[in-house]
Image (cartoon, helix red, strand yellow):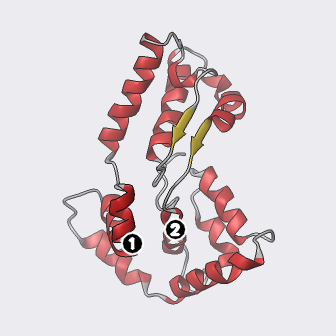
Amino acid sequence: YGLFSARIQAKENEFSRSNAYKYIPSTIPLLRHLFWFLTGPNLPESLEWIVDDIAGVLGSADLSSIVKEFHTKVWTDDPVLHFYETFLAIYNPRERERCGVYYTPEPVVSYIVRSIHHILKDKFGKADGLADKGVTLLDPAAGTLSFPSMAIRLAKEELENKGKGGIFPGLVKEHILPHFYAFELMVAHAGAYPAQGL
C-alpha cells in the first residue's frame, strides 16, 4: 500500500522499485527512510522479488483512472479511510477482524493523544507532556502512524508554546527517536498511508 501511494506520485513509465523512495513526500521522512531500505542496495535478496513484483504490477497499472475517480468522486468519508479500510478488508478480512485493525479518524486520534498529553502533565508531573524525556510512547498497532505522528506534533507544539521551538530538532534526536516506538501486527499494510508531517 505504501508502494501504491508512491506510484500515484510517479509519472507514467517512471516507477520501479529502485526509484519508489523519491516519490514519498519529504514531509514523511520516516517513510522515505523505510523506502530507501526497500529500494536501496541493501535489500535482502529474499525480499527483492516480492518488492519488484509489487512495483511491477503498480508500474503497469492504469492508475490515472483511479486518481481521476478519486478527484471527481464526492467523498462522504475521509478518502484515506476509504483506501485504508478497503485495502484491509480485501487484503485479509479475517486477520483484520482478529487483530482489530481499523483506521482511527484524525479527530479521535487528536482527542486521545491530547488527553494523554494532559494527563502526563497534570497527573504524572511531566511538565512538557509528550516532550518530556522521561516519557516512552508505544503504539503496538501503528497502521497509518497517526498516533505517533500526532504525539510528535504535540511535543513540538508544547515546546513552541513555551518559546523553546528551536530545540525541537535536538528533542527528535535525543527523545523521540529513542523513546517513541511503533510496530504493526499486520506487516503487509504497515506504513500504508502515514499521517502527514511525520
Marks 1,2: beta carbons within 8 A: yes
Q: Secondary structure at mark 1?
A: loop
Q: Quadrant of the C terminus?
A: top right
To which residue does mark 2 refer?
188
Q: Amino acid at mark 1?
A: Asn
Q: Is residue 163 above or below residue 50?
A: above
Instruction: Between residue 102 and residue 55, name the one nearer to us.
Output: 102
Residue 99 percent coordinates (x, y): 39, 57
Q: Residue furthest bottom?
A: 60
Q: Secondary structure at mark 2?
A: helix
Q: Is residue 25 above or below residue 182?
A: below
User: If you read the primary sequence from the N terminus, does the residue marked by circle 1 or circle 2 appear first?
Assistant: 1
Q: How many neighbours does mark 2 have within 10 angstroms: few (below 14), some (14-19), or many (20 or more)?
A: some
To which residue does mark 1 refer?
92
Residue 62 visible in the displayed image: yes
Instruction: Between residue 15 and residue 31, name the one nearer to us.
Output: 31
Count of number-bearing discs: 2
Instruction: Between residue 37 and residue 18, name the one nearer to us.
Output: 37
Q: How many neighbours does mark 1 have within 10 angstroms: few (below 14), some (14-19), or many (20 or more)?
A: few
Q: Is residue 167 above or below residue 163?
A: below
